[in-house]
Amino acid sequence: MQKMTDWLAEVKWTEDGLVPAIVQDHTSGRVLMFAWMDRAALAETAASGRAVFWSRSRRSVWRKGESSGHVQRVRELWLDCDGDVVLLRVEQEGGIACHTGRLSCFFRRLQDGRWEAIDPVLKDPADIYGDSSR
């Protein structure tokens, strides 16, 4: 019988103990964001059903939605063929994944040699985070 934690051993972690995580809307397939996970974040995500990441800038665990309320409910976890990238298929609460107040962190598209913001701001970040928007 396989132990519940054996699945974590199959993940190929970076030298820093991290794995890239792509977050995708489980209904539309739209990529919402990219983040990093450490072993504890991935284990908590699987156990709780709520997306948890490792913030490299803060050097701490980051529970998506803890300050914004825009929680990601994990529907499925996937591991790529090389074992070095995790895909989270989620239900995005509040319809906003990006700290800029947009649906997706991928809102700029290359057009005519420059990056153009395509997606609208759905909610002002100051209204989400207060005066200290991220």
Image (cartoon, rainbow, N blue to C red):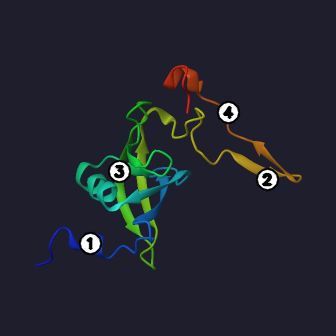
What number is the disc on residue 74?
A: 3
**Residue closest to the eye, 89 or 44:** 44
Query: Mark 2 vs mark 3: which is more N-terminal?
Result: 3
Q: Circle 1 sits in a helix, a strand or a loop, which is it?
A: helix
Q: Is residue 92 left or right of residue 34?
A: left
Quadrant where the N terminus is found in the figure = bottom left
Q: Tell me the residue that label 2 is attached to.
A: 110
Query: Mark 4 vs mark 1: which is more N-terminal?
Result: 1
Q: Circle 2 sits in a helix, a strand or a loop, which is it?
A: strand
For marks 2 and 3, give the CA distance.
Answer: 30 Å
Indicate which label's residue lies in the foreground, 4 or 1.
1
Which residue is drawn at the image coordinates 45% and 79% (left, top)? 81
Query: Mark 1 vs mark 3: which is more N-terminal?
Result: 1
- Any part of residue 31 in sight: yes
Q: Residue 29: image x %, image y %?
A: 52, 55
Query: Mark 3 vs mark 4: which is more N-terminal?
Result: 3
Q: Is residue 74 above or below residue 3?
A: above
